[in-house]
Amino acid sequence: MASSSPPPPSKRRRKDQTVDDDTSSPVVVFAHGAGAPSSSDWMIKWKDMLKKALNAVEVVTFDYPYISGGGKRKPPPKAEKLVEFHTDVVKDTVAKFPGHPLILAGKSMGSRVSCMVAGKEDIAVSAVICLGYPLKGMKGAVRDETLLQVTVPVMFVQGSKDGLCPLEKLEAVLKKMKPMNELHVIDGGDHSFKIAKKHLQINESTQDEVEDLAVQSIAEFISTTLGER
């Protein structure tokens, strides 16, 4: 019986590598915020919306070590201390989905860390999606240094009533950023985009409709970004 010959080097792959001939669809690494893990209702909902809107091959979520352990939940460390772990997750994802455009997304703190990871020279990021970027620090100071160092396109979705990110201050930072960027404002939205029922009634809208518009804006931005690759 003739023995089968091993595949040529170009056809060999790692055991954990995904087989996918169509590499046009992006892979997204989606980081949670400071107070809730990737299993929260908010994260699950936005994961599903991003996957569908971006036609993503996968949206990978994970938990930072401080929130993933059992027992009493620990307070989040400084964002800089989460970069290494986040970077490892991104590299593992790239290894599993080689050739796919890489999009980093994050909720609040997760978006800030995503911007830091995007600056790594050994990671090729196509764009970053910031959902409720925490521009103001604990003492109220504007934290714009991370955004001003980003070199890839960034999409922002912010609630107009988000106390952690006054829109006028964010808009001033966006003008100073070098890469392409865009801001979609959710009118009446808080840090998690939640809108008061009265505000929705006045505008004859629903929470889902408002969030759908935000996701459409994200999809258009990413489509434009990937089209320029």
Image (cartoon, rainbow, N blue to C red):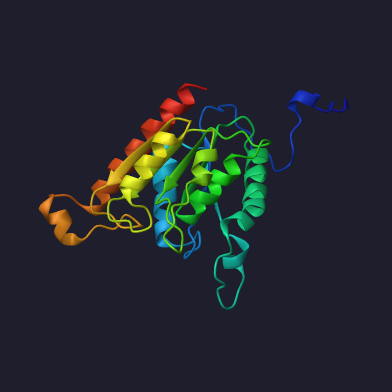
Residue 125 to residue 93: above or below? above
Drawn side of residue 102 relative to residue 197, left or right:
right
Quadrant of the rendering where the N terminus is positioned: top right
Residue pictured at 61% horizontal, 33% vertical = 124
Drawn side of residue 210 relative to residue 78, left or right:
left
Residue 169: x and y in percent read: 36, 47
Can residue 31 be spotted in the picture?
Answer: no
Asked which quadrant contains residue 108, the reply is bottom left
Residue pictured at 32% horizontal, 56% vertical = 162
Residue 20 to residue 107: above or below? above
Drawn side of residue 142 relative to residue 117, left or right:
left
Which of 90 and 3 lies nearest the eye of the viewer? 90
Residue 206: x and y in percent read: 20, 52
Can residue 61 be spotted in the picture?
Answer: yes
Which of 90 and 76 lies nearest the eye of the viewer? 76
Residue 185 to residue 223: above or below? below
